[in-house]
């Protein structure tokens, strides 16, 4: 704080009470307006020798937006724990994940060293039951070195009984905060007011020790010619303390100060420029600074003392007085404030003041125009609160657009469509200068709607409209245009993913990410990169992994590592780990994807989540669990409009799993119901082969995969071909043709080598097929050994690295040799495989043994397994 | 009926445009027809202005509802 706030006295008893309370987890100061809660906290915080660092946040007036509340809290915690430099400042997202946010705040608090006191002032202003419920969770789970102090005007619906029972809740209430007679005298002494003992007692009695009353009295008494007479008149009056004193206080101010206080009372915060505008006079900044120095009711909001706010009670009383004294001026003042905030780009405040001025059509126009940027800025809940402030009778057609946006965020697609239809009808009759803007906003919402519904043709159509160039744009239109273009590219990329135009999808998502970075929309950049990771399935697994990890790292830098926006990358990484046979890692990423998606109910993204979970079960041989996941995915797929190429993947997995789970009849029936185009895809051909094998007809299985093997059946990813070779191998084995079986297995291994794939072998149950491959005939002995490791289940659960003696990292050359150790190839044979000399192998082996602290080949293999160095999929 | 400690002047009364007021001793009595949400609005205003609320009571007992029925004192 730049300067000590004057006219505050050290209330020793109360400070001691707060100190005692701070020994518990949570302290609640619950007392009426003007009781001196904030002043007490400030005095406690500024006291020399305060052992704790403070994270202070002030809840904004009438805060409906849970996300804004949590962001402010996170910001306060970060500033206090001095971790702010480590990451980007917290930013809002259009799809907010509240539980993840609580975890984030808790982990920031846990990371902070030393004691921290979290202060939440004016908690009664928080008008979001959701945020209160999450706050309860935060308060009951505070780390040991953290204490929280809450101030509120009334008791809140926080369920803190656990803390209360544990004796961890302290309360300071209204009666405790009343000034004693002695404190009353100290207050006047500190303000330099000469008042007799009896006068002070009378004043104390009249105000009942109410802090705001005493402070108001102190302002009026400062420099008063006859303080005793003031007190006598005051105690002789029957008027309420607040009204009497505010009138006295105002009357004693010079005319320009009075005028400024009244006219700026309708602002939540004020600076000199804004006050000049509302009073129509220059010099307001000086007045505000003087008021802040002399008066506990005007508080600076920043260290530079440019913004100020009035104490709520004080401001409310002034506002009533303004309405009474200058009723005709009020709408005009709101209008001027709205104009100023619009110019500053502070749209939410601008819209609030336009509403307060009663200019409903203009307020609706502003809200509709900026609904798109406000949504991207993560202000969805604030927008809903603004919407509710419109009078129910006066239907503004433009608001349909805003309502549609809100519906979309929450996945109410039918309602969104209905509201969009209303907005479209209105746009046709709108004045020409408004039409383009409205149409653009409508198109962007229709684009999101079409995408979420899986209506791909609709997506392409809207993108075409949005991409059409416009002339005569203002700067604002250009900014809006860039936002829209980035969103359009993202949605287009996603649509292309689903129709398997993967190279196009990659291109558009890369363009979208680049544009988002350029225009400073990190949220959109993360969104595009997460989808890009998902669209990379045709790339080598190393590329997929790199893209996933890059997207996740960027998301984490912004604190969105658990938000729905990053889920596509999390899921893709999970599935990649499954392909590589690292099922434990897969499960970890999958759990994280589930957490990130807990607030998103969209069919499209949940379909992918079920599919990924099913794949993990398949890898672990749990066919029935896998079947449940795939059925759920299929059900969600049926809710999407139109058919989706991506969906054949799910259908193929579903049918094959049914057959493997002993239900070939059901699988056969479902297969018969598919249309020809679907049935001829590689994924479905493979499923057909699995069904044939389960039915005991290996010859039909060989026939089923023939099209996949000769490349005539379209496949989503090359893994499908690996699988087809294995199915063919299994069928040949059944037919007694062991040579053909081994050849098929060898082809599968050859294809799987570069990515070191494991899952297709696990999924098809190819263990015996692989074991029958003569070791000296395969060119892929190391991969073969790694796969068999996983299939035997000898792949150990991840051992805590720290519990093992540290090992020096193996070189890439050593790792290559290491992977041959579980095979029964001799040194010269390994040398042959790797095209190096036997001497080189010997050198590598000695080095490996030394680094792993072992003496021989078999203990090296065991140690390498413990360290997971043999995991087939380990590419790092 | 809402009873508040002290006399409310024109400024404070303007916060309760829907209610009639009369003075009773050192207190102000506000009366009016309020549904449940209007009542909570008035109570929030009383709280925001730091007024000393003494009593809230329903005057017409024939349509009794639990929210309006109980009388409280601070």
Image (cartoon, coloured by chain):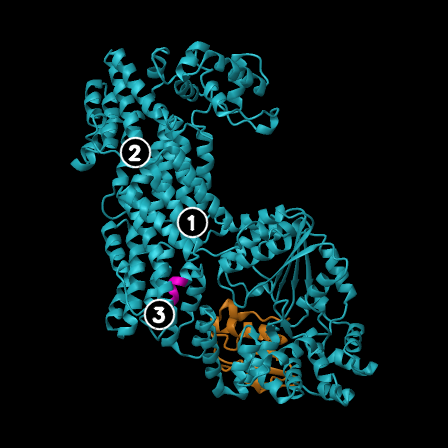
Chain colours: A cyan, B orange
* Residue A312 falls in image quadrant: bottom right
Q: Which mark is residue A526?
A: 1
Q: Are marks 3 and 2 on the same chain?
A: yes
Closer to the camera in the image, A384 or A462: A462
Q: Is residue A613 left or right of residue B17?
A: left
Answer with the quarter of the image where residue A727 lies. top left
Q: Are marks 3 and 2 in contact (CB under 8 Å)?
A: no
Marks 3 and 2, Cα distance to the nearest angstrom?
A: 46 Å
Query: Which residue carries the number 3 mark?
Result: A474
In percent of the image, x 38 and y 64: which residue is there? A371
Q: Is residue A224 magenta?
A: no
Judge whether residue B20 can be spotted in this image: no
Closer to the observer: label 3 or label 2? 3
Q: Chain of mark 1?
A: A
Q: Which residue is mark 2?
A: A717
Distance, label 3 to label 1, CA atoms, is: 28 Å
């Amino acid at each position: 704080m730049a300067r000590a706030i004057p006219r505050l006295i050290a209330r020793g008893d109360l400070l001691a009470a707060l100190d005692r309370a701070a020994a518990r987890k949570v302290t609640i100061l619950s007392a009426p307006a003007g009781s001196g809660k904030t002043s007490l906290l400030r005095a406690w915080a500024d006291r020399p020798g305060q052992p704790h660092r403070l994270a202070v946040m002030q809840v904004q007036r009438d805060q409906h937006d849970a996300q804004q509340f949590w962001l402010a809290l996170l910001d306060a915690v970060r500033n206090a724990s001095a971790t702010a430099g480590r990451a980007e400042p917290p930013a809002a997202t259009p799809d907010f994940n509240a539980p993840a946010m609580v975890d984030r705040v808790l982990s920031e608090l846990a990371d902070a060293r030393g004691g921290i006191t979290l202060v939440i002032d004016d908690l009664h202003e928080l008008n979001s039951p959701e945020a209160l419920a999450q706050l309860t969770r935060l308060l009951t789970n505070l780390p040991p070195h953290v204490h929280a102090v809450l101030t509120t005007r009334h008791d809140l619906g926080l369920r803190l009984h656990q803390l209360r029972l544990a004796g961890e809740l302290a309360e300071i209430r209204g009666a405790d905060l009343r000034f004693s007679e002695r404190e009353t005298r100290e207050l006047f002494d500190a303000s330099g007011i000469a008042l007799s003992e009896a006068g002070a007692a009378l004043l104390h009695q009249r105000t009942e020790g109410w802090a705001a009353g005493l402070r108001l009295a102190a302002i009026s008494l400062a420099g008063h010619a006859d303080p005793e007479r003031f007190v006598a008149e005051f105690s002789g009056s029957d008027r309420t303390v607040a009204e009497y004193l505010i009138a006295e206080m105002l009357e004693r101010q010079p005319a320009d100060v009075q005028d400024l206080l009244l006219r700026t009372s309708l602002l939540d915060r004020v600076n000199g420029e804004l006050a000049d505008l509302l009073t129509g006079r220059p010099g307001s900044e000086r007045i505000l600074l003087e008021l802040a120095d002399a008066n506990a009711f005007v508080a600076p909001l920043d260290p530079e003392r440019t913004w100020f706010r009035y104490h709520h009670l004080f401001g409310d009383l002034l506002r009533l007085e303004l309405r009474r004294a200058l009723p005709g001026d009020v709408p005009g003042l709101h209008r001027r404030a709205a104009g100023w905030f619009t110019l500053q780009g502070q749209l939410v405040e601008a819209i609030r003041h336009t509403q307060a001025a009663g200019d409903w059509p203009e307020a609706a126009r502003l809200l509709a125009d900026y609904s798109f940027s406000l949504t991207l800025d993560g202000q969805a809940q604030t927008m809903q609160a603004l919407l509710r402030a419109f009078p129910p009778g006066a239907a503004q057609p433009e608001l349909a657009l805003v309502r549609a946006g809100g519906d979309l965020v929450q996945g109410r697609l039918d309602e969104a469509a209905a509201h969009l239809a209303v907005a479209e009808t209105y746009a046709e009759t709108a004045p020409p200068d408004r039409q383009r803007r409205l149409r653009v906003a409508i198109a962007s919402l229709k684009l999101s709607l079409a995408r979420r519904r899986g209506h791909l043709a609709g997506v392409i159509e809207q993108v075409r409209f949005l991409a059409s160039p416009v002339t005569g744009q203002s700067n604002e239109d250009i900014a809006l245009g860039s936002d829209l273009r980035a969103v359009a590219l993202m949605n287009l990329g996603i649509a292309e993913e689903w129709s398997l135009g993967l190279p196009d999808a990659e291109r558009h998502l890369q363009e979208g990410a680049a544009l988002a970075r350029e225009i400073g929309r990190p949220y959109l950049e993360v969104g595009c990169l997460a989808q890009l990771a998902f669209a990379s399935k045709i790339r080598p697994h190393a590329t997929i992994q790199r893209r996933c990890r890059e997207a996740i790292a960027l998301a984490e830098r912004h604190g969105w590592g658990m938000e729905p926006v990053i889920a596509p990358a999390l899921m893709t990484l999970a599935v990649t780990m499954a392909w590589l046979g690292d099922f434990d890692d897969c499960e970890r990423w999958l759990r994280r994807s589930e957490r990130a998606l807990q607030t998103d109910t969209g069919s499209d993204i949940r379909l992918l989540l079920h599919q990924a979970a099913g794949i993990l079960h398949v890898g672990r041989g749990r066919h029935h669990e896998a079947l449940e996941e795939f059925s759920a995915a299929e059900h969600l797929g049926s809710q999407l409009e139109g058919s989706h190429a991506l969906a054949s993947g799910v259908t193929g997995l579903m049918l094959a799993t049914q057959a493997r789970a002993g239900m070939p009849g059901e699988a056969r029936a479902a297969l018969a119901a598919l249309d020809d185009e679907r049935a001829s895809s590689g994924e479905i051909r493979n499923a057909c082969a699995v069904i044939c094998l389960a039915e005991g007809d290996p010859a039909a299985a060989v026939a089923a995969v023939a099209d996949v093997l000769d490349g005539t059946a379209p496949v989503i990813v090359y893994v499908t071909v690996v699988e087809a070779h294995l199915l063919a191998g299994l069928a040949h084995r059944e037919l007694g043709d062991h040579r053909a079986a081994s050849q098929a297995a060898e082809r599968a291994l050859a294809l799987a080598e570069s990515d070191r794939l494991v899952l297709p072998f696990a999924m098809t149950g190819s263990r015996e097929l692989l074991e029958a491959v003569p070791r000296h005939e395969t060119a892929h002995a190391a991969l073969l050994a790694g796969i068999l490791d996983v299939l035997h289940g000898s792949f150990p659960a991840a051992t805590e690295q720290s519990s093992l003696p540290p090992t020096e990292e193996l070189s890439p050359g050593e790792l290559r040799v290491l992977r041959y150790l579980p095979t029964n190839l001799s040194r010269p044979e390994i040398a042959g495989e790797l095209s190096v000399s036997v001497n080189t192998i010997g050198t590598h082996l000695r080095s490996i043994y030394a680094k792993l602290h072992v003496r021989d080949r078999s203990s090296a293999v065991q140690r390498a397994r413990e360290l997971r160095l043999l995991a087939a999929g380990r590419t790092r | 009926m809402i009873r508040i400690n002290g006399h409310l002047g024109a400024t404070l009364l303007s916060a309760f445009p829907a209610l009639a007021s009369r003075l009773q001793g050192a207190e102000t009595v506000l009366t009016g027809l309020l549904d449940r949400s209007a009542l909570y609005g008035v109570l929030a205003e009383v709280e925001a202005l730091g007024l000393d609320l003494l009593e809230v009571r329903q005057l017409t007992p024939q349509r009794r509802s639990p929210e309006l029925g109980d009388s409280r004192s601070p």
